[in-house]
Amino acid sequence: MRKHQIFGFALATAFSALFIFACSKGDTISEPAPIDKDAPRIPDGDRIIIHFGTSTYKGCLYSFSNCIWIGWGSKERNYMDNFGLQFGNGAAAEQYFGQYFPLTADYVVTKSEAAELGLKEQVIRAGFYPIRKHATGMETNMRMVDFSPESVQPVASVVNPNNPQDNIGQLHNLAVQVVLNENMSALRTLGQDKSAVQALLTEKTAQFLAEAQLPASATEQQRAQTTNVHRDYSDYIARLEETRLSDNDKNVLRAVFNEAASMPVRTPQELSNFVSRMTAFENELSGTTNLNNRKMVLSMISVLKYSRYYWFWKSISSREFGTGTDQPASIPDWVWADVIGLELGGPLVSAIASAAVYLDQR
């Protein structure tokens, strides 16, 4: 059974920051960018509501989706006087998450939930929490996430409902995670056959999006197979110039991209700084009229933030995807492929480009 289903959900939060635009805040764009019939379809953020797992028994733990239901025989536990999450099928959970469970937004343990577990009301901070073998004195398949303040590597909440396109980034991360997790053996078998790899990624990503009630048309799927996703993404400014965005929107994104590229991300703290800065850009841009294609600009920044978060987490968490050490400080090419791929062909090509370039360079 698939571990992800789609339902409606709403979020609310606030965050303020400063951003200097190419245009003054008081100005407005009177002429919208012309509609390109070949431009990708970007769904409204509120249409992308992803729940993951098998039960709605408890509240929402955020992890690459709006509300993660967990699955794998999960059960909330009092673990040494801390909120804990026990996985009955620990091997499957460990394969999916690796060494760390990424809690992507703060989680409130309510009064009733705390009382049921014999705990105090508390707020669990966003960050990376280790997944450990369940200490029973016997060898067991169980795994445990200990959400104690002592065990967390804190990272600022990547979830930002203040950006109406926040869910584009969440969709991207979950799509890449699901497609790579379920198809890595088949992708490795294809080796350096880039056409075959792209065809398989297209098929599996389109299947994921259909299950997310965001089906790609036959034309979009065909275009995804023929789009050249293998480009020099390290020259992200050149790739930005090739997009269909207006000069005004390119100027805005150029400032965001250059600052993002200047920020080293080698540790969870540096990742937290990066997330906070991108969230600040999102918040300022969400309240302005100085954009021709507001949906695309906000979506590209969301994907940039989520993708940087995702691939850093993978690099330190998963023996399968990384070496267990921090990423280099610079943004990997496959993150820029995520962002530019979104403008090339929407969520479908974004996920394909990300995975394809990652596999090509690893």
Image (tube, rainbow, N blue to C red):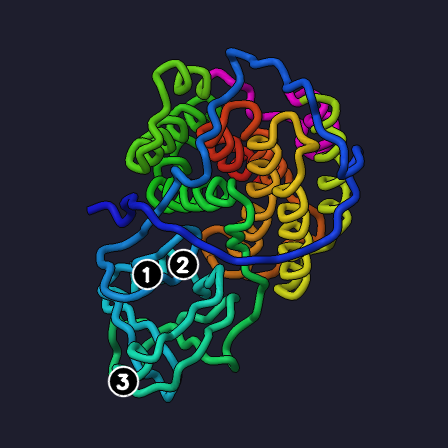
**Nearest to N terminus: mark 2 or mark 3:** 2
Reading the image, the residue beneath label 2 is: 97
Q: For the magenta stretch, what is the residue range? A: 226-245
The image position of residue 163, as x and y in percent, is 55, 45
Question: Residue reaching furthest front?
Answer: 26
**Location of mark 3 (residue):** 136
- On screen, 345 above or below 355? above
Q: Earlier in the sequence, mark 1 or mark 3?
A: 1
Q: Residue 170 at x, y = what percent?
A: 46, 46
C-alpha span from label 2 to label 1: 6 Å
Q: Residues within 10 Å of mark 1 (few under 14, many from 20)?
A: many
Residue 93 marker:
1
Which element is circle 1 on?
Answer: helix
Q: Which residue is located at x 45 percent, y 71 percent?
A: 130
Q: Secondary structure at mark 3?
A: loop
Classified by dominant secondary structure, the portion drawn in magenta counts as loop
Let me know if residue 241 is in the magenta part.
yes
Residue 111's place in the image compared with 46, above or below, is below
